[in-house]
Image: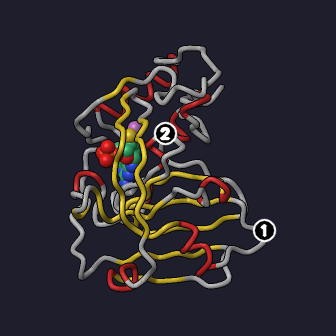
Amino acid sequence: MTDDAETPADTKLTRTKQAWARAGKFLTGRVARPESERLPPGQHLVKDWPVLDLGLQPEIQLASWTLDIDGAVEQPLHWRWADLLAQEQTRDVSDIHCVTTWSRYDNHWEGVSTRTLLDLVRPKPEAGFVVLHSYDGYTTNLTLEDFASEDAILAHGWEGKPIPTEHGGPLRLVLPKLYFWKSAKWLRRIEFTLANQPGFWEVRGYHDRGDPWREERYSDD
Ligand SMILES: Nc1nc2c(c(=O)[nH]1)N[C@H]1C(S)=C(S)[C@@H](COP(=O)(O)O)O[C@H]1N2
Ligand SMILES: [Mo]
């Protein structure tokens, strides 16, 4: 499960979402965000929490779980579960915005802030990007700046409980300010890179950055 080429890309949902990217589906053409607005353009509110993935939900036992943090950093790390829990823990409440147009307010997350991680690994000056690798073969890319967002959390808890497997447990990223496809579930490796390396959805017609307030759903070409 470490080879990205094995990603089970050819599911019905994957094909549908690729077609949406080609067609520009859900774009409202609006750009501005009035201060009073909490729901980004083209989104609707849900109360439940939909599950979206490639149709493969890896079951990772905590005893065999590991997280590698490597690439262009001064101090690469190889964490087991106890190492993750030994770090300073952070809680945050944030909204989810999925590119398929649902949003969910007030999610209570617990985990390790990406800033805590950055202090430990110390990215090299030339590192500008991050690639997240997951146990299901999924990848997604971020700028180092977005990864370092104040409210970005390597999350293991949701609403006071472990994050359920279908939602990315044991550990997922939560990066509230970008569409949720950037929040990789089942994290296995965080790689710091010099160059931008588009991930699973980014090479399938989705936007490189994915800011919901700018409706950055799809790439322009
Ligand atoms: N590893 C992995 N992470 C992933 C995905 C995936 O398929 N695999 N899907 C992304 C997408 S498109 C979305 S909308 C969210 C969905 O998270 P949820 O299932 O907890 O709602 O996870 C993102 N992270
Ligand atoms: Mo998504």
The residue that disc 1 covers is 126
Check mark 1 vs ligand 1: CB closer than 8 Å? yes or no: no
Q: Quadrant of the N terminus?
A: bottom left
Amino acid type at circle 1 is Glu
195 horizontally vs 59: left or right: right
Check mark 2 vs ligand 2: CB closer than 8 Å? yes or no: yes
Q: Quadrant of the C terminus?
A: top right
Instruction: Tell which residue pokes out farthest to the front in this image.
Output: 36
Q: Are marks 2 and 1 in contact (CB under 8 Å)?
A: no
User: Is the residue 84 above or below the residue 112 in the image?
Assistant: below
Dot 2: within a 10 Å radius of its alpha carbon, few (fewer than 14), some, or many (20 or more) residues? Answer: many
The residue nearer to you, when weighing 33 against 142, is 33
Task: Give the distance between the C-alpha atoms of the residues marked 2 and 1, in whole angstroms.
Answer: 26 Å
101 horizontally vs 121: left or right: left
The residue nearer to you, when weighing 91 against 102, is 91
Q: Position of residue 199 (x, y in %)?
A: 53, 49
Which circle's residue, 2 or 1, is located before the other in the chain?
Answer: 1
Amino acid type at circle 2 is Tyr
